[in-house]
Image (cartoon, rainbow, N blue to C red):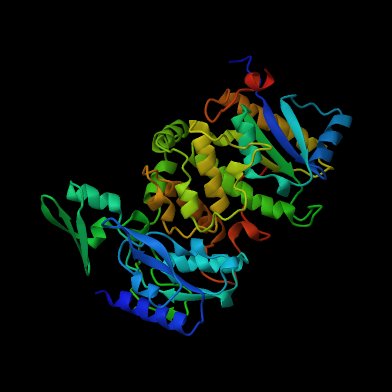
Amino acid sequence: MNPIVDNIRTMAKELLEKGEVEAVIGFRQGSLPLSTEPTMATTPEEANSLTWDANCRLNLAAYLTKERGKVAVVAKGCDSRNIVGHIVENRIKREDVVIIGVPCTGMIDAGKAATMAQAEILDAVENDETIILTTAAGETRAAKTDLLRQNCSLCTHRNPVISDMMAGEPVPEQADIDRYADIREIESKPSDEKWAFFDEAFSACTRCYACKNACPLCYCPTCFVDESRPQWVGKGTDPVDVRTYHMLRAVHCAGRCTECGACESACPMGIPVRLLTRKMEKTVGERWGLEAGLSTETRPAQDTFRLDDPEEFIM
Amino acid sequence: MSSFEPKIVTFLCNWCSYGAADLAGVSRFQYPPNMRVIRVPCSGRISPKMILAALRKGADGVWISGCHPGDCHYIEGNYYARRKFTLLKEMLEFNGIEPGRLHFSWISSAEGVKFAEVANKVVDEVRQLGPAKVFIKESPEESAA
């Protein structure tokens, strides 16, 4: 078994036995191959169900709220940055959360695995950097790096930036990553082609809001999509409403998004929502040199300013 | 297309740019009548969703004007606004809204001349782009009906 799983369980049991936390938020095995589900272990016995593999796509920072009392949470690199964000935004107190950090080599994209197996996957076994997919027709072996989600293959913060205990040895950070090749390609298109590109890309959106429910940043008591006086955006799947929703959500999350990819992994329709959040991440980095969630001393980009912020577009 | 007159939703901050519009008026400076002015307390009050609402309802262009940096009545509202506008402008252009439809300016209440100049420039640029074709949920004619 993966030593990280053992470490997580041992740490969780100890925390629960000593009564240091009310609960440990982690992952347990899902009911289907290549899936996990979030779980909240409140007793040492329940801690035995905690697990860790390459399918922990959700971001557990989304479950942290003030009302929970003191909890422990399992966090990979991106999740830890969202926990930093929660602390900065005064959503939780640092002393109210115990962070079990997990160095992460990336989560796999279940869609990519399905495409590679070319049939229904009945079982999946992770063996170091190889994933063995079993279908009715036989076994397919795939390198984990070939199945990674895009945000994981572009990741530059695999190790947690903040933690109280670590469930594994630090992993080397990826260097020389070109995070924005696809964004630049879209930017170079003329306006009408950009519009058509996104019309096609978002055409399947059913407005189920899985993306915003999975997102640790989307915690507004009333989301703008639910406001009715005035109603800023319609409820249906009208293309203009769909576009309004995705654009505004990305703008709201700009400077706070850590590219954890929970939104895209949660999407049942395969909408590339991260194109918009990554465009915002690129803007925040290029214009103001900021990266979200690296330090509790830095405010989110839209909550601060510099006197000499570039403003060449303002007359 | 020569008869096309663009409709431009204009957000003016109460303390500077709205005063500039007033000054341009009493000074009899000429500028085109294509603007529909919305007076806001501060450019920092303008949410991205207001700008999107204007476009969704069929505005051909949006122009936002506030106090010069350092002159904000609320000390720092326009600095936050500048960051919000940067992000929204990048987002809209990335999505295929033509760059010439969205304009920003800093105009103090003493700059009636600048107000008229910028107004002319904004209207010219939007007129050249022609009527808005994308991102319209409800045309102005429908909302009037």
Q: Position of residue A99 (x, y in %)?
A: 47, 75
Is A60 placed above or below A22 here?
A: above
Is A141 placed above or below B120 here?
A: below
> Going by the image, does A46 lie left or right of A130?
right
Question: A76 or A201: nearer the eye?
Answer: A76
Image label count: 0
Is A129 placed above or below A7 here?
A: above
Dividing the picture into quadrants, the one containing residue A100 is bottom left
Answer yes or no: is residue A169 visible: no
| Residue occupying the far left of the picture | A138
What residue sits 56% from the left and 28% below the top? B136
Q: Position of residue A188 (x, y in %)?
A: 42, 41
Q: Position of residue A52 (x, y in %)?
A: 33, 69
Q: Position of residue A191 (x, y in %)?
A: 47, 34
Question: A150 or B76: nearer the eye?
Answer: A150
| Residue occupying the far bottom of the picture | A18
Answer yes or no: is residue A54 visible: yes
